[in-house]
Amino acid sequence: DSPEWEVDPRVAPAVGERRIRKSACDAFHETGLDELPREADVRHVVIAGATTEQCIDTTCRRAVTLGYDVTLIGDGHSTFDSVELSADAVIGHHHRVLDGFGAHVSGRPCEVRVVTAKAVVFSGQLENSE
């Protein structure tokens, strides 16, 4: 509830939309997030946010192991430069590592696909990525 964690009005939930607060880098950990898509029979989630090497990486991997296909919006997540690597290098590395990451869950293959925001169409279809 601090000013640093306020949601930007351009992406804020509409009135009546549910907000889920998390306290770990895994958005599914102890949040109830897994129940929402399951209740609606959703098997594909779209992920964006911060921080690439922590929250984004962990949530993508967890989503796959829970049985979701994942679209990671490649130009929709960020991080900071570190002593060892620039933010661009960290993001590029995670795109290479996560794109195609997958698992078989209950006999069904699930995987991460990295695409640009422009390629995401929320009607359930993906256009060709650039």
Image: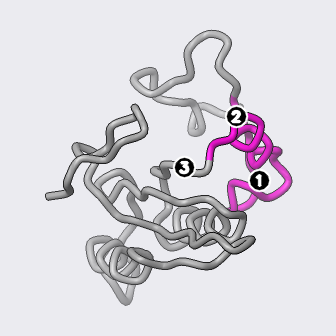
Q: Residue at x 52, y 63 (%)?
A: 56
The chosen color scheme is one colour
Kind of residue indicated by mark 3: Val
Q: Quadrant of residue 38?
A: top right
Part of the protein shown in magenta = 19-42
Q: Nearer the viewer, residue 30 or 118?
A: 118
Q: Position of residue 57 (x, y in %)?
A: 54, 70
Callouts 3 and 2 close, C-beta under 8 Å:
no
The kind of secondary structure element at disc 2 is loop
The kind of secondary structure element at disc 1 is loop
Kind of residue indicated by mark 2: Ala
Callouts 1 and 2 close, C-beta under 8 Å:
no
Label 3 or label 2, whichever comes before in sequence order: 2
Kind of residue indicated by mark 1: Ser
Q: Residue at x 23, y 47 (%)?
A: 127
Give the residue number, with chain letter if any, for mark 2: 40
Q: Position of residue 19 (x, y in %)?
A: 69, 30
Q: Which mark is residue 23?
A: 1
Q: Residue at x 54, y 60 (%)?
A: 69
The kind of secondary structure element at disc 3 is strand
State whether residue 98 is above or below residue 79.
below
State whether residue 104 is above or below residue 17.
below
- Main SS category, magenta section: loop
22 magenta-colored: yes
Q: Nearer the viewer, residue 37 or 21?
A: 37
Q: Which mark is residue 45?
A: 3
Label 1 or label 2, whichever comes before in sequence order: 1
Q: CA distance from mark 1 to mark 2?
A: 24 Å
Label 1 or label 3, whichever comes before in sequence order: 1
Q: Residue at x 48, y 79 (%)?
A: 101
